Amino acid sequence: MNERLMGEIIASMEEELANGIKKTGIKGNHVWMTVEQSVFPKIAGHIHNSWGATLVSMHAVDNRFISSDYKLCIILALKGEDDFVTLVTSVDSKDTVFPSVTPEIFSADWYEREINDMFGLQAKGHPDLKPLVLYDDWPEGTYPLRKDFAADSRVLRIPRPYNYRNVEGEGVFVIPVGPVHAGVIEPGHFRFSVAGEPIIDLELRLGYVHKGIEKISERMPYSKGVLLAERISGDNSFAHSLAYCQAVEALCNAKVPERSRFVRCIFSELERIYNHLGDVGGIALDTAFSIGAQHAYILRERVMDINDLLTGSRFLRGVNCLGGVWKGIDERGRSKLIERLVMVKLDFQEFYDEVIGTPSVMDRLETTGVLSYEAAKDLNIVGPGARASGIDRDVRRDHPYAAYRDLSFKVPILTQGDVNARFQVKSEEIFESISIIEQALSNMPEGEPRIDIPTPEPGRTAMSLVESPRGELLHWIVSGEGKPFRHKIRDASFHNWRAMEVAVLGNIVPDFPLVNKSFSLSYSGNDL
Amino acid sequence: MLETIRKGVLKKGVVTDRYPYVPYMPYDGHLGMPMVDEAKCTSDKVCEQVCPTTAIRFAPGQLSIDLGLCIFCGECARRCPHQAIIMSKEFELASKRREGLVRFYVVQQ
Ligand code: SF4
């Protein structure tokens, strides 16, 4: 199957591009191509445009101590198939420049800025290669993900100015917001330019909580890496640890017990339910519909309480482990869970009816923060935000993992792309998730929840995609001696933050929190 | 207004607890403070190795757990071959001094 596919892909290229391919290989549903640097952007662009592929990730690996160069990878997911193409090229260790992919694939923009920050590899032809994830006072010429940068080294902080986009004109005002916000939320700086009421430009500045997780992970044995992954983004703990575990299991070709696959689905969906409940509650709160919001929060609390009862952790930590799950679901937990879900379903239906039956709320939700299909596609938006703008993509269905192949569910798609559409998509997903859990509970086979897996051999590569509540997230690992040699993490928010810059245009500033809540973005997941 | 009261207070009742006036009892399996059973510990230091945050330290005849470093992951309790550490239901751990967060246990050498 894949050989044919690879043949077709190569045959569809112009001769000049096809000649630039140096080596190809197939591993599972991955097609690998090692290509010349000069045609790297063109080939990526060709597969992206002609094959309708989406950009899953672009990242670098410091291979200088092995093959004396840097490697650059692009992972593309083919449309409608459970297949991936990975393009690899090499970047010279002295002349650290490579041709930019951004002119071909717009959503490579942030990836190239990140690579510049972390590895010091410059994308030539990139429109605006300013820092993205590093702090403002991080010294130039210090690249944290290079292998010769020691993880515990202290650097001398030298403040340097950051080049914000300049919006000028008569009556244009700039409103800087953050990085410190009112309320207990994470830091991010938003720069609105307004002409009268409407926002005409928004620039984001993130990276204030960059923690160097990818670097830390390179020092963490795999078993501890699971605990690290659980803490990448607080409310997506389960999705991150699942992606990490699946990637390590793939590294050593381990097959986890059937039972654990179902348990993993159940907890993934519980995580989705409590996140979505928090989001729809937040949307209600930001329209000043406090009573509705409190109802959603009560429901969220009920779900987190059942998490606590089943696992001992409200955030579902300490469940995933390499080779399965630590905690199965026993009879008592199972009946409690079923009971609680019925209650949540009924109460949520009531909340939903209450919201859509309140004209003052709907007035705020409809036509606010519109993200068009084209914009969502170009920016490579993932998750519920994308599905509300008509992008039909869900990792659970398109690249099934855990037990999703054996469960049936609908993927709600709407096309309006406004706050209301995102509210509706999330609401429908809550109902779908409840049904998935019910199916998984009744189909769950008996047996051990976990097996011991061997330590992966060095030099292998594996990746895992998971549909977190916020959307597709990726863990990509090259194995080293008992720990990852390179661990690339890409949270859904890394793609989705950019939607804000587009969706708020033309809206008034007071609608910003509403739009923000409807995308439910993570600072911590973005600032790895 | 009446509708609101009907839907809110009357239907849902009061959902908050009276904690701290009424004590809160966590569920079984709660990941609270790790606690050492001094009699069972053989000082084989498995927990020290598996702890991701170096919260557990051994000194001759003594084991200390620094709750300021602990992330309550439960790894020490799961991996201990003698079940000498359990994740207790203790969760009221605040202290006015940093040193107050370190718990000491006397163990075999
Ligand atoms: S619970 Fe985790 S962090 Fe705390 S002492 Fe045990 S292993 Fe260390």
Image (cartoon, coloured by chain):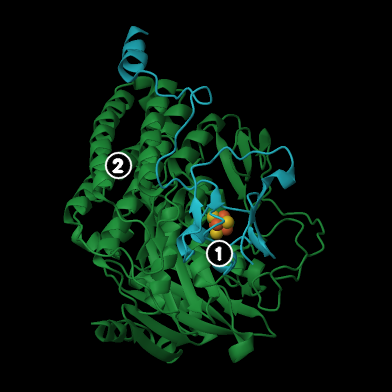
Chain colours: A green, B cyan
Q: Residues within 10 Å of mark 2 (few under 14, many from 20)?
A: many
Q: How many marks?
A: 2
Considering depth in this image, is A475 or A40 the residue closer to the camera?
Answer: A475
Chain at numbered mark 2: A
Q: Secondary structure at mark 1?
A: helix
x%, y% of residue A360? 39, 21
Q: Which residue is denoted by mark 1 in the rendering?
A: B47
Looking at the picture, does residue B90 appear above or below residue A478? Answer: above
Q: Which residue is denoted by mark 2 in the rendering?
A: A430
Q: Are marks 1 and 2 on the same chain?
A: no
Amino acid found under the numbered disc labelled 2: Ile
Quarter of the rendered structure image containing ligand 1? bottom right
Q: Please tell me in which quadrant of the rendered image residue A401 appears.
A: bottom left
Considering depth in this image, is A206 or A156 the residue closer to the camera?
Answer: A156
Considering depth in this image, is B50 or A315 the residue closer to the camera?
Answer: B50
Q: Is residue A120 left or right of residue B36?
A: right
Is the distance from the Cβ of mark 1 to the nearest ligand 1 atom less than 8 Å? Answer: yes
x%, y% of residue A486? 55, 75
